[in-house]
Amino acid sequence: MTAVQADLRIERPSVEDGAALWRIAKDSGTLDLNSSYAYLLWCRDFAATSAVARAEGGEPVGFVTGYVRPEDPHTLLVWQVAVDAAQRGRGLAAALLDGLTARVAAERPLTAVETTIAPGNTASERLFTSYAERHGATVTREVLFDTGLFPDGPHDPEVLYRIGPLAF
């Protein structure tokens, strides 16, 4: 558990957090919303590589989900980062990302973080480039999934941001 501010703490999510994570993602207005079932599974199967920020009463107010890439076990792929609207502007997304990567690195070698960002998502671009700066790492970018790969209608390409090398 990591303290962010006196009224917030960061820890592993539990299955009981799945509904709140789904709501925060839905309310974000920018994330691709997965099914509520997916968030429940994520909180069960990937809790070790995810984090939730809790307000004083224990309710989730932000989260980051991720997983260790099977083909590259020293790389954490960050799937989604979201913060409740009432908590935005407090540095919570950065604290979640820093807290999660520090926890994962304490449990296994971690040399890189990856994420995908759609063009024009400046908040995510800033979050991950500032993460790289804080950790003295470089950022490389390349299109991972082009528009034509998405079967469900028009979708912006997903650009892979690879941050590394990291040293903890």
Image (cartoon, grey):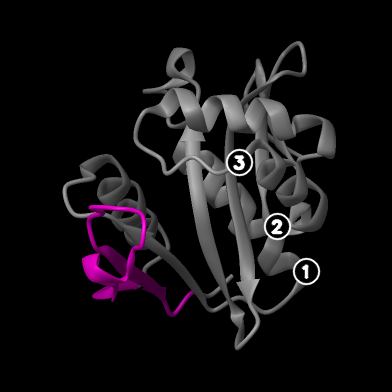
**Mark 1 sits on what residue?**
107
Looking at the picture, how far across and down is residue 78, in whole percent? 51, 59
- The disc label shown at residue 103, or none: 2
Looking at the picture, which amino acid does disc 1 mark? Glu
Q: Residues within 10 Å of mark 1 (few under 14, many from 20)?
A: few
Residue 128 falls left or right of residue 95: left
Local secondary structure at mark 2: helix
100 or 149: nearer the eye? 149
Disc nearest the viewer among 1 and 3 = 3
> Is 46 a magenta residue?
no
Disc nearest the viewer among 3 and 2 = 3
Q: Quadrant of the C terminus?
A: bottom right
Q: Which residues are magenta?
A: 138-166
Distance from disc 3 to disc 2, alpha carbons, whole Å, reads 27 Å
Q: Quadrant of the N terminus?
A: top right
139 or 119: nearer the eye? 119
Local secondary structure at mark 3: loop
User: Which corner quadrant of the image does residue 139 belong to?
Assistant: bottom left
User: Which corner quadrant of the image does residue 164 belong to?
Assistant: bottom left
Looking at the picture, which amino acid does disc 3 mark? Ser
In the rendered image, the residue lying farthest to the bottom is: 71
Disc 1, disc 2: CB below 8 Å? Answer: yes
Looking at the picture, how far across and down is residue 71, in whole percent? 60, 88
Task: Kindly identify the residue that appears in the image at 65 percent across and 82 percent down.
Answer: 70
Distance from disc 1 to disc 3, alpha carbons, whole Å, reads 29 Å
11 or 43: nearer the eye? 43
Above or below, 2 against 61 in this view is below
Above or below, 132 against 23 in this view is below
**Mark 3 sits on what residue?**
35
